[in-house]
Image (spheres, rainbow, N blue to C red):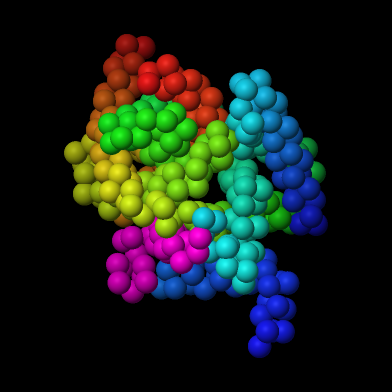
């Protein structure tokens, strides 16, 4: 038994592949069976990741030797590598298509999410700049929070909160979009591009638009693609300094 | 070959990281500021350039697409290695910030939409 366990620990990254594969399979199955796909499988899977972390220690499940490979698969290196690879879907001609209104929506959307999140965190008792900025970044997307938190050296529990905020946003966007699409004028490609830029959370935007009008998905996805990259640049730099001046 | 695509992705990633580290140093952080954003920018420019020249075939591209399909699995693994035990007591703030901030962003959409229409009429 001990030999088998030791063998598995020596292959920890492969154990992590298997574990994440099983988590994703179960999450997509839950999404399809119990929510008819209304809550995206990805959001369920990330929530499951946070729940799994609870059973570990200060480094989540990776404190348990068998699951130490999760720290490699989910570490900064592979995380940033896979984020960069998502830019493959974009091209210069697409950037031109989004134009100034797309860029403007992105800036407004990132600033709105960041400041509303950061100020709420401040109001709720978080007064150190690192926590406030990381929580504000989490209000952008579930990836901007941890990237920003790592860049400025925030604590892991604050990073966990920022992921949870981003996941809640993603689920809420998916569920709310079809319900309020008409009220916010989300009926044409141009508003879809603005919507993608302001909301930014790619999985939520794509799922929400698909449930509203599948023809609008590419327009929303176009601007949303740039949101994460731009927010990862702005949150730990310009927005950090503005926040530092404010509190 | 797929590895060509992965190599190009690596080059863009590393160049972005170097710039991010330098920017972090310039802003007096220990961390990496915007390395991801610069990496993405390089990849967009590179891919566009090589595609136009015909150097970049579908096989190379699939090497990059593999990593972009690993995005959510990597995020799931990242979530599983956080200090959730300490964070669980702050679950309430996650819900409050997540809900209120999202609603606020939704309210901005009709405003920007209106602004962009006025801009068009102005022109």
Question: x%, y% of residue A193?
Answer: 40, 35
| Quarter of image, res A4 | bottom right
Toward the top, the furthest residue is B122
Toward the left, the furthest residue is A183
- The quadrant in which the N terminus of chain A is found is bottom right
Toward the bottom, the furthest residue is A1
> Compared with residue A114, is residue B85 higher up or lower down, i.e. above or below?
below
Q: Which stretch did the figure color magenta?
A: A30-57
| Quarter of image, res A42 | bottom left
Question: x%, y% of residue A28?
Answer: 43, 68
> Compared with residue A93, is residue A205 higher up or lower down, i.e. above or below?
below
Q: Is residue A243 visible?
A: yes
Residue at image coords 51%, 60%: A57
- The quadrant in which the C terminus of chain A is found is top left
Question: x%, y% of residue A210?
Answer: 36, 53
Residue at image coords 69%, 36%: B17
Q: Is residue A229 magenta?
A: no
Question: x%, y% of residue A225?
Answer: 50, 40
Residue at image coords 68%, 56%: B62
Q: Nearer the viewer, residue A233 or B69?
A: A233
> Compared with residue A100, is residue B96 higher up or lower down, i.e. above or below?
below
Residue at image coords 26%, 25%: B111
């Amino acid at each position: 038994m001990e030999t088998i366990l030791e063998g598995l620990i020596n292959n920890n990254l492969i154990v992590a592949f298997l574990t994440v594969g099983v988590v994703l399979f179960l999450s997509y199955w839950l999404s399809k069976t119990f929510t008819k796909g209304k809550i995206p499988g990805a959001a369920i899977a990330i929530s499951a990741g946070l729940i799994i972390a609870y059973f570990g220690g200060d480094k989540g499940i990776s404190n348990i030797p068998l699951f130490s490979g999760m720290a490699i698969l989910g570490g900064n290196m592979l995380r940033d590598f896979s984020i960069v690879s998502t830019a493959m879907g974009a091209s210069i001609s697409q950037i031109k298509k989004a134009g100034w209104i797309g860029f403007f929506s992105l800036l407004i959307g990132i600033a709105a999410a960041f400041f509303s999140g950061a100020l709420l965190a401040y109001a709720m008792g978080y007064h150190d700049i690192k926590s406030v900025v990381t929580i504000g970044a989490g209000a952008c997307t579930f990836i901007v929070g941890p990237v920003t938190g790592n860049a400025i050296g925030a604590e892991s529990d604050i990073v966990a909160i920022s992921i949870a905020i981003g996941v809640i946003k993603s689920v809420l966007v998916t569920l709310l979009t079809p319900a309020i699409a008409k009220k916010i004028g989300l009926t044409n490609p141009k508003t879809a591009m603005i919507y993608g830029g302001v909301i930014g959370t790619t999985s939520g935007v794509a799922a929400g638009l698909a449930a509203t009008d599948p023809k609008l998905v590419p327009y929303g996805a176009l601007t949303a693609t740039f949101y994460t990259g731009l927010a990862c640049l702005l949150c730990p730099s310009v927005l950090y300094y503005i926040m530092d001046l404010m509190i | 070959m797929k590895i060509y695509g992965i190599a190009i992705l690596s080059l863009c990633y590393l160049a972005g990281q170097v710039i991010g580290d330098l920017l972090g140093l310039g802003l007096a952080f220990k961390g990496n500021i915007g390395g991801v954003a610069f990496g993405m920018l390089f990849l967009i420019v590179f891919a566009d350039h090589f595609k136009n020249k015909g150097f970049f075939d579908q096989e190379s591209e699939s090497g990059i697409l593999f990593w972009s399909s690993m995005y959510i699995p990597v995020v799931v693994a990242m979530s599983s290695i956080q200090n959730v035990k300490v964070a669980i007591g702050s679950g309430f703030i996650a819900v409050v910030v997540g809900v209120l901030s999202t609603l606020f962003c939704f309210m901005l959409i009709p405003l920007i939409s209106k602004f962009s229409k006025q801009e068009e009429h102005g022109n």
